[in-house]
Image (tube, rainbow, N blue to C red):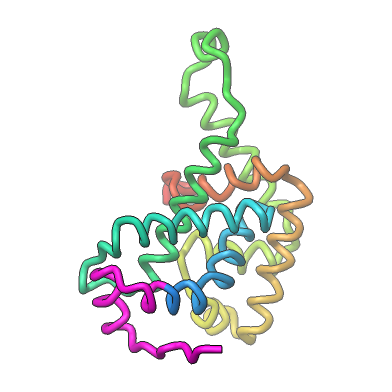
Amino acid sequence: MTERVKYDVNQLVQDLKKGYEPAFDYLFTTRYEDLCRFARAFVGSYDVAEDIVQDVFVRIWENNLKISSDISLDSYLYVAVRNGCVSYARRQRPHVGLEALSEMETEEILAEDWKYVWDAVESLPEQCRVVLKLVVLEDMKYAEAAEKLDISVNTVKTQMKIAYRELRKKFTSGEISVLFYYFYVGEGFNGR
């Protein structure tokens, strides 16, 4: 078994931009599983999450890495995976027929979707709901949410797991993708 080269982030980014295979291998083996777990939290299926993450890695391999020096590599990867999840959500979202669109204004459709999502979030147990809103809607890190609520980071992690589990019970895989789309891409709840 060959020993894997260890990289510091700056050298890794430079080597990825040049298309060096060992750099790509290192990136894949060190980031793949975490990115799959991240994607799975939103699409509900590990198989779909793997497809999304693999697509991101294929684009990086085929096009080399195109990243600005002022953006962190992990931020780049997570945004790329998030965008892949959003694309998946758009493809999975039930299509409304043209006849129905002519009868309903687009804003009415969006308002119904917002209410559906918001009601699901509001139905969560109180601590789950508060933690989810801080982490997702206010874009806080787990440590920041823990400090604000005066609870441990592990409690925040546990509450997020419970929140996602409860939301998965309420939504199909496609609907959880739409939920993810609204949280991360939509204009946000209550004027966010």
**Residue 90 location (% of width, % of height):** 51, 37
- Left or right of 77? Residue 144 is right
Q: Residue furthest right?
A: 169
Residue drawn at (60%, 85%), measured in percent from left and top?
Answer: 150
Q: Name the residue nearer the viewer: 116 or 85.
A: 85
Q: Name the residue nearer the viewer: 44 or 130.
A: 44
**Residue 74 location (% of width, % of height):** 40, 73
119 within the magenta span: no
- Left or right of 37? Residue 125 is right
Q: Quadrant of residue 155?
A: bottom right
- Left or right of 172? Residue 179 is left
**Residue 4 location (% of width, % of height):** 46, 88
Residue drawn at (59%, 46%), measured in percent from left and top?
Answer: 177
> 57 above or below 156?
above
> 148 above or below 185?
below
20 within the magenta span: yes
**Residue 165 location (% of width, % of height):** 75, 60
> 131 above or below 147?
above
The range drawn in magenta is 1-24
Q: Residue furthest left?
A: 69
Number of marks in the rendered image = 0
Q: Quadrant of residue 41?
A: bottom right
Q: Quadrant of the N terminus?
A: bottom right
Residue drawn at (71%, 53%), measured in percent from left and top?
Answer: 167
Residue drawn at (40%, 90%), measured in percent from left and top?
Answer: 6
